Amino acid sequence: MRLSGVVIFSIASLCLAGCTSTSGVDALQVPSSETTSSVVRPPAPVASVSAADAAPDFAQEEATEQTVAMATPEPAESIEPPAELALVAPKRLARAAPMPAEPVQRYRFRDAKPINFGKASPRHLAVHGVDVSRWQGNVNWGKLRAQGANFAYIKATDGGDHLDPMFKKNWRNADAAGLKRGAYHFFYWCRTAGEQADWFIRNVPRVEGALPPVIDVEWNGESSCKRRPSRQKVLEKMQVFMDKLERHYGQRPIIYTAPDFYRDNLRGAFLDYPFWLRAVAQHPSKVYPGRKWVFWQYSGSGLSHGVRGRIDLNVFHGDERAWRNWVGGRQMVAEAE
């Protein structure tokens, strides 16, 4: 049967209307740009810097100082994220072979306030290093290395929103000078552990060959946070922070502490964690009896041509062979002496 022209025109008009309508079934298949609170979106990428300014191992994380230092707005009341929203734990960093350490430079530092440790002198240990922050200013890493700095722990973050303004520069230049480098976080007792771990992870790149991250726990009378939690709360917060870092970096964090904080909170705790102990008047065996340790901070008054003013001096607990094994991934906690 043949259709009249009017009928044919009417059918064609209906077809065109259906193709251009946004209320049909096809319109439901268009992906929405909306997000809900139940969806965790990755953070927006940070601005990149030129190849001349970025070190090769910073290719993914490097950004301008201003961009990285900007804090993420914090909620009115912070809580630890539930397990399903936590950062995905990456696999441990794969190593085809142990990472070789640079040749060990012998100790040639001076000390403005030398201590006679007797037979327990740190000079009898082979591998010395330093820790630095913004207060050392512009460090000449080449001179520091030549005077005996084989490793450096570099202040990265504290709390949940502060980035040391010299961290990026120190991180790059220490590596370029041949030092083994690691980053440390100063723990702030008025912020949640999860927030602080996320802030550290945001600012400290995960790179092959870096030393394990450090959590610096101590009582700081100059801090704006005057809170001193109970021992149980201290240990809980530390565990949350360290677990997050270990999942992300594939390395068990090192605990740095001082005598008073250790006495109040850490005796008998975290026996399977490596420790970095401050003891500037006596050997660690006297100040922290029975505690195993990897690093000893033996002076806060070191002198070097690489910095103006004073610098903290540290030593590794072991000989050159133990050092090479440790930085090569075969990390063991040294026995207490």
Image: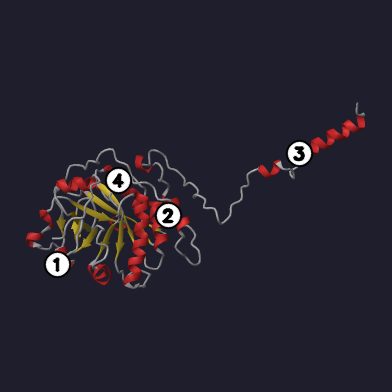
Numbered badge on residue 20? 3
Task: Compare marks 1 and 2 and give the one earlier in the sequence.
Answer: 2
Task: Compare marks 3 and 2 and give the one earlier in the sequence.
Answer: 3
Task: Compare marks 4 and 3 and give the one earlier in the sequence.
Answer: 3
Q: How far is mark 3 from mark 1, CA to CA? A: 83 Å
Q: Which residue shows up at 28% across the image and 47% down it?
A: 174
Residue tagged 1: 286
Q: How far is mark 4 from mark 3, CA to CA? A: 61 Å
Mark nearer the viewer, 4 or 3: 3
Task: Compare marks 4 and 2 and give the one earlier in the sequence.
Answer: 2
Give SS at disc 1: helix
Residue tagged 2: 69
Q: How far is mark 3 from mark 2, CA to CA? A: 49 Å
Q: How far is mark 1 from mark 2, CA to CA? A: 40 Å
Amino acid at pointer 1: Lys
1 or 162: nearer the viewer: 1
Residue tagged 4: 173
Q: Quadrant of residue 290?
A: bottom left
Give SS at disc 4: helix
Is residue 249 at all visible to an observer of this figure? yes
Task: Compare marks 3 and 1 and give the one earlier in the sequence.
Answer: 3
Mark nearer the viewer, 4 or 1: 1
